[in-house]
Image (cartoon, rainbow, N blue to C red):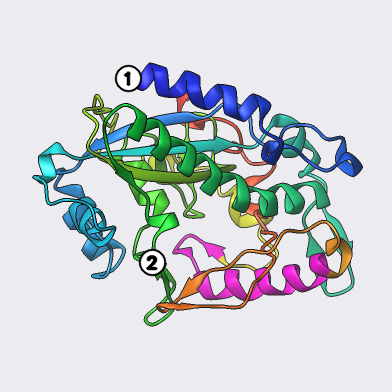
Amino acid sequence: MKEEILLYLNEIFAANELNRLPERYGGGRIFSNPLIGVAGGNDSIFERFKEVVGPEHLTPIELWLDCNQEDIASSKLRILSIVFPFVNEIREASKDQIVLPRVILPAEVYSVGRNYANKFKPYILKQLINYFEKQGFQAASAMLSEAFTILTKGGFHSTWSERHIAFAAGLGTFSLHEALITEVGCNVRLASLVTNAPLEITLRKSENPYANCLYYTKGTCRKCEEKCPAEAITQEGHNKTLCYNYGQKVARKMISRLSPLLKPHIRRVNGVLRPPTYPVGCAFCQFGVPCMDKNPTNEE
């Protein structure tokens, strides 16, 4: 069934208009073909996420029940994680920055693509839920449910971390800049759902959460640190507060430049729906670095 799902997704990624840039930027695809991975619902790693991410982070069975699905043994659940890789054209264009007084902005094409992803990802999840239902199974997604919220107390985290879910599903490992380095690099978006379909579990290549990062494995690189204008990345790791504050500065400038093109996005923060925002991203640390479009440790 995994192969069938991947073919199904490839068709949608290729044909759907939500995966297209505006004509102003060429009208091409935003994401190339996806990667998928599957974790088992009773994997002990999900309990560890309550320590690593936060005690509010849901296990698959908790999410399943919060989404009003029938009670089931956690061993019967599967977590399908999806990697959305930005196309090479966007990645290459994003190596160039917009330098303004007191702020450096990412390439417009990345900001638009990043913004449009917030419509495409839930669309894909809804299509997959329908796909499973037609096969006689059920599925639920944190992204589409009230169970998902961003939490700001005690740092920035959420009740369902797509990066950690992707790690559990064998799709990659973390980095100095905290993004997930997949086999197609770190410049990706992520989404996931939980299902009772008996999908084959993807084995993790390593239990080391930093196995794909050159800094943590070889003590080399640190290119992401050099690229960050907010100075939010050091050998001690990623400072989310500095990153967030600079991201807000970028957003204010980019929204004034791109507002006619951008699509609104509504998020739940601390359990409360916020007014629409227009996220455009930053991601300086993901462009022009060895892990931008590949797992760099494969070349070592």
Left or right of residue 3, residue 85 in this image? right
Neighbourhood count class around disc 1 (C-alpha, 10 Å): few under 14, some 14–19, many 20 upward: few
- Label 1, on which residue? 1
**Position above or below: 61 against 196:** below
Is residue 172 part of the magenta span, yes or no? no
Residue 90 sits in which quadrant?
top right
Residue 209 seen in render = no
User: Looking at the image, which residue is at 71% across and 30% down?
Assistant: 88
- Label 2, on which residue? 146
Q: Which residues are magenta?
A: 233-255
Where is residue 141 drawn, in percent x and y?
37, 50
Q: Nearer the viewer, residue 287 or 193?
A: 193
Left or right of residue 60, residue 260 in this image? right
Residue 180 seen in render = yes
Left or right of residue 200, residue 72 in this image? left
User: Looking at the image, which residue is at 86% across and 61% down?
Assistant: 260
Q: Which amino acid lies under the numbered mark 2 shown in the image of this protein?
A: Glu
